[in-house]
Amino acid sequence: MMRLHRVRVWAAVGLAVAMPLVCRAAKEFSMPKTQPAFSFPAHDHHSNENVTVAVDPYDTAAKGNTFVVKYREHNLLPVLLIITNDSDDPIQLTGMKAELVTSDRTKLTPDSEEDIIRRISHPNASGTHYPIPFPTKKVKGGLNSKEMDEIQSAQFRAKAVEPRSSQAGFLFFDVADISNPLAGARFYLTGVRNSSGSDLMYFEVPLDKYLESQKQH
C-alpha cells in the first residue's frame, strides 16, 4: 500500500511538472489586434502629415505570455511598433530606421531575424528529461517549428502603410547589461517617406509616457 502511495505521489509530481510544459508546447503565437497608434500612451503624432507612430513595450510577465518564446530570458525586449496613416496618400517604409536611446544615451537598434535565432537557439545542456513526451520538432538551430514561425511572423515587416490604415509588428532589442532600458528612454523612427519619396520629419516617442500609464493600472 505504501509503495502504491509513493507511485501515485510521484506520478502527481511528474504531471504537475509536465503540464505547463505541454501547454507551452501546444501554444501558438497570435499577433495582437492592430489598434490605431494614437490609442497607445507612448506615441508621436505629426499633424502636418497625419501620421502617428506608437510603441508598446512587452516588458511584463502578462504581456510576455503573448509569445511562445520567453524573450526576456534571453535579454531581448519585444517592442510593438504601430504606424497609423490618416492621410489620403500611402507612406513608404522601405528606408525606415528604428532606434531606442536609453537614458544614458546607449543607442540600440533592433536585432535582425538571424540575431534573434542565434540568441535563443542554444542546446539544452542540462539534458533534463520530463515524465512524458511532447512535440519538440526542431527545424533550425534548436528551435521548434512554432518558435521559428513566431520569430518570422512577429517582426515588423511592412514596406508601406496605405491611406486610413495602420501597420504593426514587433522590434526586438538586445537589453543585456541594461538594468532599466525604458526609464528615460526615447524611441526614434526615421526614413518614413511620403508618396513622393520625400522624408517625413523624424518621430520621437518618450518611453516615460508608457511607464506613467502603467503606474495608473
Image (tube, rainbow, N blue to C red):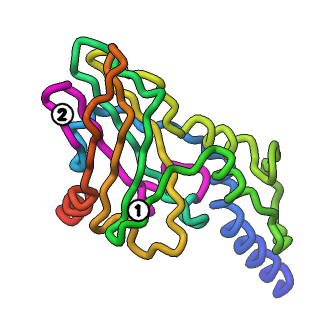
- The mark closer to the camera, 1 or 2, is 2
Frontmost residue, 199 versus 209: 199
At numbered mark 1, what does the secondary structure look like: helix, strand or loop?
Answer: loop
Q: Are marks 1 and 2 in contact (CB under 8 Å)?
A: no
Look at label 1 and name its amino acid.
Thr
Disc 2: which residue: 46
Look at label 2 and name its amino acid.
His
- Residue 195, given in percent of the width and then of the height, sits at 33, 14
| Residue at point 42%, 55% (across, down) | 58
Frontmost residue, 92 versus 129: 92
Question: Is 182 above or below relative to 146?
Answer: below
- Residue 198, given in percent of the width and then of the height, sits at 32, 22
Frontmost residue, 195 versus 33: 195
Q: Which mark is residue 60?
A: 1
The image quadrant that residue 120 belongs to is bottom right
| Residue at point 21%, 49% (across, down) | 41
Q: Which mark is residue 173?
A: none
Which range is magenta? 44-70
- Residue 179, given in percent of the width and then of the height, sits at 43, 76
Location of the C terminus (image quadrant): bottom left
Location of the N terminus (image quadrant): bottom right
| Residue at point 42%, 22% (across, down) | 160
Q: Residues within 10 Å of mark 2 (few under 14, many from 20)?
A: few
